[in-house]
Amino acid sequence: MIFNREINVSDRQIRLMAPVIFWALIFLVKMIRVFPFYEGPSLTEHLETIVITTSLELIPFCLFYFYLIPQLFSKGRMFWYAVLLSVLFLASFGFVWGWVYYYRGVVTSHQEQMVIYKASLGHNILSVLYAFVLGFTVEWLEQFRKQKEITEKQIRSELALLRSQINPHFLFNTLNNINSFSGSNPEKTSFAIIKLSEIMRYMLYDARDELVPLEKEIAYIRNYLSLQRLRFRNPEFVKCDISDETGHVMVPPLLFITFIENAFKHGKTSMTNSIGIKLRVTQSTIHFDCMNHIRNKSNTEEQAEGGIGIENTKRRLELLFPKRHQLLIENDGQVFHVQLKIRLNEN
């Protein structure tokens, strides 16, 4: 899985930065609207009016955005307390507007103050509307970020669990393979131990990463096939066509081994019933193909069926490559055929 690098901005920083940017844009728009129509002393007066008006609009905005809206999101007494405080504030803050304009000498009578009071209600309601829209937007972004983080953690945890279920199964099978010829052929045993050490090094160190170079995954598969060939008189029954041209592709570790293990576990091992494995990369797509002829099973083996390896791999593919992979499994009772295509990210 390829995760995009994102700027690490906390929810608190977003909540603080959003109104600063928003009101800076509003102030800029007001300034642009004034400059073409005024000049000289009148321009200074209008700029001063814009500063004072914007400052008065900021008071209800900040009160609602930072305090009342969070209370309105809550339940119980605090909700009704916030509603009551909102009504009282909107009804009384207009008098502050009137007093400010009276102090500046813009209005000189109580009648004019009432006109300012009524006009201020529109400004206050608009500021509150700004606070609600921006507050709900930031709240939605915070919830979206949290949900995304939770989802990614769940995916990582599930992938770690699926991978942990793969490794013990593989190790158990490999040790059984070595044990089958350890007493009769010391040279094979020595060769197998070297291959196993390379496999274990890959599983213990490289396979802990989210992504590994495809060439390392291929080397791991080749080592596994070398161990399997040691078990049979005719090792050439394994038809392997794995390209060395990987194009610096990165893949999740241990992604293909389940299908290969399954082929050896359930497949016939004669020259006329070979196991075929193909892997290549073309045009940012990985093509994997694994085919085996199904051998007859004993009653004991049929009763022991029910492994979860392939189901785990299906789940990993769904998590790692959503809508970017195609897995086709055909089983007619005679041949088991797996075809997997993975479309890689361009980066």
Image (cartoon, rainbow, N blue to C red):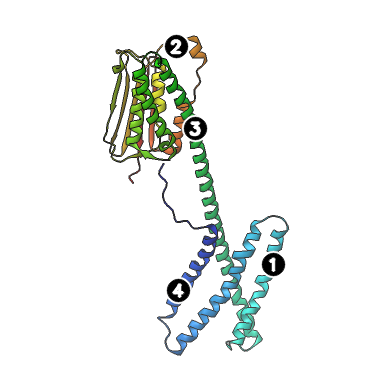
Identity of the amino acid at label 3? Ser
Query: In the depicted view, which residue is nearer to us: 305 or 226?
Result: 226
Kindly report the distance in space between the C-alpha atoms of the residues bearing marks 4 and 2.
Answer: 79 Å
Look at the numbered disc 2 and give the secondary structure of its residue.
loop
Place residue 259 in its image quadrant: top left
Identity of the amino acid at label 4? Leu
What mark, if any, has residue 85 been given in the picture?
Answer: 1
Look at the numbered disc 1 and give the secondary structure of its residue.
helix
What mark, if any, has residue 164 been given in the picture?
Answer: 3
Q: Is residue 186 left or right of residue 163?
A: left
Provide the residue designation for mark 4.
Answer: 28
Q: Earlier along the polypeptide chain: callout 4 or callout 1?
A: 4
Provide the residue designation for mark 2.
Answer: 297
Residue 239 visible to an observer of this rendering = yes
Q: Earlier along the polypeptide chain: callout 1 or callout 2?
A: 1
Kindly report the distance in space between the C-alpha atoms of the residues bearing marks 3 and 4.
Answer: 57 Å
Residue 254 visible to an observer of this rendering = no
Kindly report the distance in space between the C-alpha atoms of the residues bearing marks 3 and 2.
Answer: 28 Å
Kindly report the distance in space between the C-alpha atoms of the residues bearing marks 3 and 1.
Answer: 56 Å
